[in-house]
Amino acid sequence: MEIEDLNKISHKDMYTVVGDNATIPDQLPQSLINLRDYQQELAVLALKGSNTIICAGTNSGKTFVALHVIERHLANNTAGKSIINVILPTNLILNIHGLHEVAINQSYSYKCIGGKINIDIYYLLNVGKVVFMTRTNVLLGQQFETACKLLPNLSAKGKIRKWEADQDITSETFKNMVNRCSIIFLTPKSLCNFLDNEIEHSRVDIDQFTLLVLDECHHTYGKSPYNEIMGHYRKKKFGNGQNKLPQIMGLTASPGTNRAKDKFGAKEHLLRIMTNLDVKELSVVTKCESNLLEYSSRPDRVPIISKQRQENPVQDILMKAMDSVEDILDCSQITTYLMNPTNDAEGLFEALRNPPKDRTSERYILWLSETKKKIEEKSTNEIQVLRLMHACFRHLEFYAECLEVNSLLDISHVRSKLKDGLKRLKEESIKASDDKEIELIDILNEVFTKVYALGRRIEGNPDVEKIIEVLKKEYQKQEEDSRFLIFVKTRTTAKSLVEKLPVELNSRHLTGSQVSKEEGGLSKEEQIDIVKRFKEGKHLCLVATSVASEGLDIQQCTLMIRYRLQANEISSYQMRGRIRREGGKEVLIASQEELEREEINVERLFLMELAIKEVLKEDVKQEIATSERNIYEMEEQTRQRLKTNHNSEKKGKFYINCAKCGKFIVDGQYIRRIKKAHCIICDKEIFDKIDRRQTKKSQTFAEIKKTDKVFGLTCGHNWGSILIYQECAFVSLSQDYMTIVDKETREPLCFRKWSDVHMEYPLDDITDTELIEYRSKQ
């Protein structure tokens, strides 16, 4: 087959190579997507090929608009070609620069030229390649199913696919999927992984796509995955002088204000989001507002002030225990350490002497977090003192969590929390040699005994009783047609509250997948199944964390309860937007202070609307163009710094301590990466410092198997896990359990992930020679 000439065809000349005698064999079927007038207005800019943000309220049908734009985009991005000097079987599929053939006309003529057969073939090339991104697995499945339903012709041909972030296939297969498909649904983090892949045959480039759709695009800021993707876009645009860039289409109900206090701050935030997305014009309904109002409904808001128990013995027990822990923080050995000038602990001393009096307030939680960081910053030979202070703060944090559970739920849930916490904290202090640390466990044991001794005759939570009352009243109106959503702050609350709700609702909790099932987490498959069963009416009520706050489309939903959950203007608006049916109701169960804060969200939404109107009136193209180039230049400086770092003298100039007690773990010179991602300790001596504990289930990904948990042998604290790679067992430390300290300054550093460490202290990939040497020591 002579394919050299075909390989010269590019995106740019695909329209000009069409012969005069070319025919288009298949016409696209009539669209199943019928847009309302206001939706057509929202689609105008995107249909012209302009980058835009489609900004319209919840339940306005932004997904329908996006799919209509995608359908037209794919129709416009096709090309025909005729007279190719090649011998072809009748049904051969061609791949040209990743552009996939979608139709072949079987009429052709034969001519003898130099012993070869010249076949006159007419075919269509689909040069459109669309990526549709959503931030959660629940939304990913929902949007994918909607696309398959509304674009059946593409779906039947296998041109619409969903990439599962944890599916057991290789990056190379993802590249093949890109070549085969017209529309790919995936999370932004998945696309980041492929754009960042340093292995050439596994990497995809952003210019392989012709349209990027970013659902809930208001998250395009800072180091978010959306903005990382746009960083690749900016690099192509400015760094390579690239003209062949994908079109950008963002979808959002609320761009937000970033806590702006006035119209100018809200406008500045909106322009930053537009700049990050290379958007010069917004798509907003202005001409067809009356049509939009015909299909819009605003749910009634019902504020209910949270009630306190008349008697609260559980809170009294917990408060007394916290008094005892704070007394330990005031013991002589800690005071002596804090008063020693050589330890430079004046700031820590001051913080420990002034804890907020109200332990149920956010201020107290903030004090715990900030003071704990001050302890982690201390680098000293007095490990026992640091260990004790760490232990005290772990117990204070746990009691604060129990106070929250007690305020939101009932005594049975506090008992369950105490049971799990007692087991965990005992394990963390199993190596304790200090009497004061042992005393902390004695205090916890006493709390556990006292709470269990209270018995069942104790006042229930009035707020929970109010929730049940509201649900029963609404259920009586609609019965099996009911769909109720309750939003709460934590997984523990979501999981526990379900147990208290009326049995006829068959309620379920809906939470994220970041933690184990025991901690309230749900797998991706479980999340999707629960939402499906909710739509079908098998579950009439979901108790959810923020994982369900954006984009969840349940048309039957008539009631949303927000239970003691503070939110910003975006999440508040999004949660209210889950109410789809006419006559819906939003119930806020909150303290007086929380209700007053909600009024701030209303004001910020008003500022956001003003900012949108201001931007619509002005020509902001030049301002955005200048800002976008400035962002690119800053990103390029960061990339150059990272590139330079690979030859810098900072490599390995750090060491790692246990975050829970300050114990030295390993020198940074022994840290290596596997496949430029997984960080391990390339030093056999680490196994003399650890205790391995087998897990119930191992995980396998990309030739790496994650097995046992790793604990410090002398301190007993969790450090990470064991990774098996190339038949070698390595210790992999978790960022959650360690503190990185600069060797020269002795200053502890705050890194959220290993890639941040790599930016500051370049980490090498483990070499074949190192692997052989390491294996020989087994």
Image (spheres, rainbow, N blue to C red):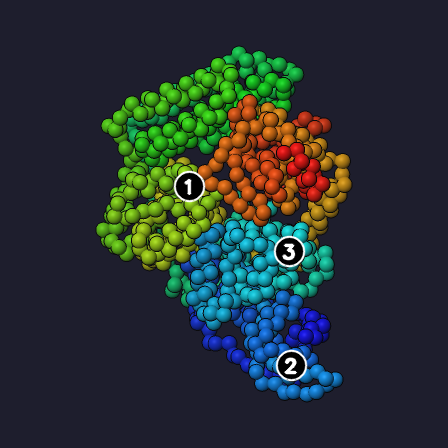
Q: Amino acid at mark 1?
A: Lys
Q: Is residue 708 visible?
A: yes
| SS under mark 2 | loop
Q: Which residue is mark 3?
A: 203
The crowding category of the residue bearing disc 1, from other C-alpha atoms within 10 Å (few below 14, some 14 to 19, many at least 20), is few
Spatial separation of the CA atoms under disc 3 and disc 1: 33 Å
Quarter of the image for the C terminus: give it: top right
Q: Which residue is mark 1?
A: 517
Q: Residue at x 53, y 31 (%)?
A: 692
- Which quadrant of the structure image shows residue 277? bottom right
453 left or right, relative to 694: left
Q: Residue at x 64, y 46 (%)?
A: 675
Spatial separation of the CA atoms under disc 2 and disc 1: 58 Å
Quarter of the image for the N terminus: give it: bottom right
Q: Earlier in the sequence, mark 3 or mark 2?
A: 2
Q: Position of residue 383 (x, y in %)?
A: 59, 20
Q: Residue at x 51, y 44 (%)?
A: 699
Spatial separation of the CA atoms under disc 3 and disc 2: 32 Å
Q: Amino acid at mark 2?
A: Ser
Q: Which residue is mark 2?
A: 82
- Asked whether 714 or 61 is in front, the reply is 714
Q: Position of residue 339 (x, y in %)?
A: 59, 14
The crowding category of the residue bearing disc 3, from other C-alpha atoms within 10 Å (few below 14, some 14 to 19, many at least 20), is some
Q: Amino acid at mark 3?
A: Arg
